[in-house]
Amino acid sequence: MKAMKKISLVILLSLFLLTSCLTQKEQIAYQNSISKMLAKNQFTFEAQRANPMSVNLINPQLLQLDGSYSVKISADTLKCYLPYFGVAQQASYGTHGNSLNFITTHFTLQKSEEKNGNYLINLQIEGQPLANKMSLSISPSGNTILTVNSVNRDAISFFGDLKL
């Protein structure tokens, strides 16, 4: 009886270790694909939660996003489709809505890898009144924080993931 319990325990532990190894291999493959995307400057950030500076003025349920908001970066184009919650210091004339919704080819991208394995990407955007700077902090697992700065609005950050 005791031998059967020991064998069952050994089999259970072996399966657990095998599952952990597969998960670790998948994580390494995912990290490699993130590195490749970043090397090509082609990736998509999918926002899952907004974090405005004036968080106490916003209904917390609105801050949880449904996954339809994103920033897509390719070698020569930046497509931004994000909501905006915050305070504008100056209202723009003739705007339709409050979102960060634009496409531009006038941007510069700088990236660096930090000692802890995180990537830091800074985008300087020219001629865009909705956002003049974006910063992405990307963990090796793909968890990302995006901060958007504007000339006439409070900054806002978003939490989400990089999508392959």
Image (cartoon, helix red, strand yellow):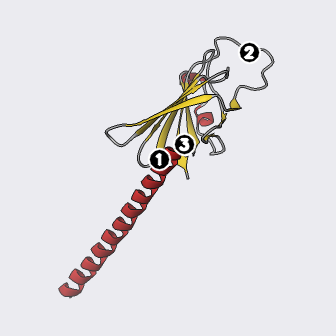
The x and y percentages for residue 6 are 21, 81
The x and y percentages for residue 71 are 61, 39
Q: Which residue is mark 2?
A: 92
* Residue name at image x 38 percent, y 67 percent: 22
Q: Which residue is mark 1?
A: 142
Q: Secondary structure at mark 3?
A: loop
* Disc nearest the viewer among 3 and 1: 3
* Residue name at image x 60 percent, y 29 percent: 107
Q: Is residue 164 left or right of residue 112?
A: right
Q: Earlier in the sequence, mark 2 or mark 3?
A: 3
Q: Is residue 1 left or right of residue 28?
A: left
Contact (Cβ within 8 Å) of mark 1 with mark 2: no
Name the quadrant of the N terminus. Answer: bottom left
> Spatial distance from mark 2 to mark 3, Cα to Cα?
32 Å
> Spatial distance from mark 1 to mark 2, Cα to Cα?
35 Å
Q: Earlier in the sequence, mark 1 or mark 2?
A: 2
Name the residue furthest left.
2
The amino acid pointed to by label 3 is: Asn
Residue 158 falls in which quadrant of the image? top right
Mark 1: few, some, or many residues within 10 Å (few <14, many ≥20)?
Answer: many
- Numbered circle sitting on residue 41: 3
Q: Is residue 127 above or below residue 112?
A: above
The x and y percentages for residue 105 are 67, 32
The amino acid pointed to by label 1 is: Gly
Residue 155 falls in which quadrant of the image? top right
Q: Is residue 86 above or below residue 31?
A: above
The amino acid pointed to by label 2 is: Ser
